[in-house]
Amino acid sequence: MDLSRTSRSGAVSPRPSAVLRAVHEKFVAGEVDATYLEASSLRPLVAKSWQRSLAKGVDPDSTARPSPVGEELARLRDAHPLAPALPVIRRLLVDDAAGSGVVVAVSAADGTLLWVEGDHSVCRRAEAMNFVPGADWSERGAGTNAPGTALAVNAELQIHGSEHFSRVVQPWSCTAVPVHDPSTGALLGALDLTGGPQVATPQALALVRATVMAVENHLALLRVTGSAFEPAPGAPAWRYWARSGRAGWSPTNSDTSGRRR
């Protein structure tokens, strides 16, 4: 998985880390407001995400909070609508990630990481920031980050280093693309690449986007051929919800925002 090349077009050029860190420090300390962010070199997408993160009470010095799924993680995986597409994800993303410095994550629509695989040494390093299966990487759980923010705005995006809201995540970069139900358009979750600067390039975004298209096509084919996904016996149910022009799938112990009760 060679993501080291750069492109003259299509990339979102990261701002110098020192500049972003200075803006971040002032913002989380309450020294500047949203108006200052909007006038700074911070991307508007990131500025709005920082504002949401602060408003939701995310601690910039904390890691992602553990999700209360605990021992239910295996059952949640078995029941999730993306489970049948996991072989496709592994074939297109995970299989080439060994030794590449890349972690591949699959999240549910509520931001819970269901699968985290890839380069084993990098996966172990990512554990230090709780980037592990079962952790809550929604914006409300971890602040600005690619999978959580992609789910919040329902759009593909990349987050570079110091654009993360949490300080412990700022050494990392990431690319995430939402996955939708091919029949209803409902948000199922997101695919994410996490690692160094090489995972936030146009090539990385194109790779994740293509994988998402393959996943959605695979789910559609299963439906057409009558091989629709059946959760394992005893697995917790995921329910479809729609409100305010958005739709998605969440565990039955969550409200329609994806927040677990």
Image: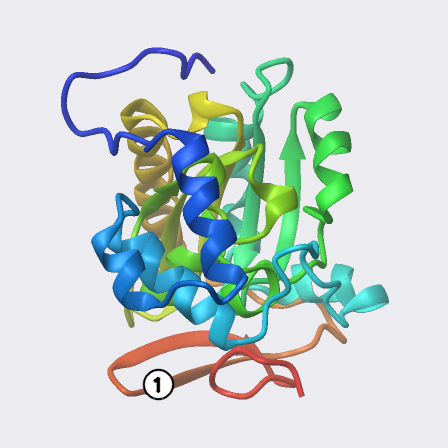
Tell me the amino acid under the disc marked 1. Answer: Ala
Q: Is residue 105 above or below residue 54?
A: above
Q: Locate residue 75, reporting x and y percent.
A: 74, 65
Q: Residue at x 49, y 67 (%)?
A: 30
Q: Is residue 103 above or below residue 215?
A: above
Residue 192 visible, this angle = yes
Residue 220 visible, this angle = no
Judge left or right: residue 114 versus residue 90.
Answer: right
Most extreme residue toward the right is 71
Q: How crowded is mark 1: few (under 14 residues within 10 Å), some or many (20 or more)?
A: few
Q: Residue at x 56, y 39 (%)?
A: 170
The quadrant of the rendering that contains the C terminus is: bottom right
Give the structural element (helix, strand or loop) at label 1.
strand
Q: Locate residue 111, reporting x and y percent.
A: 55, 63
The colour scheme of the drawn protein is rainbow
Q: What residue is pinned by disc 1?
A: 242
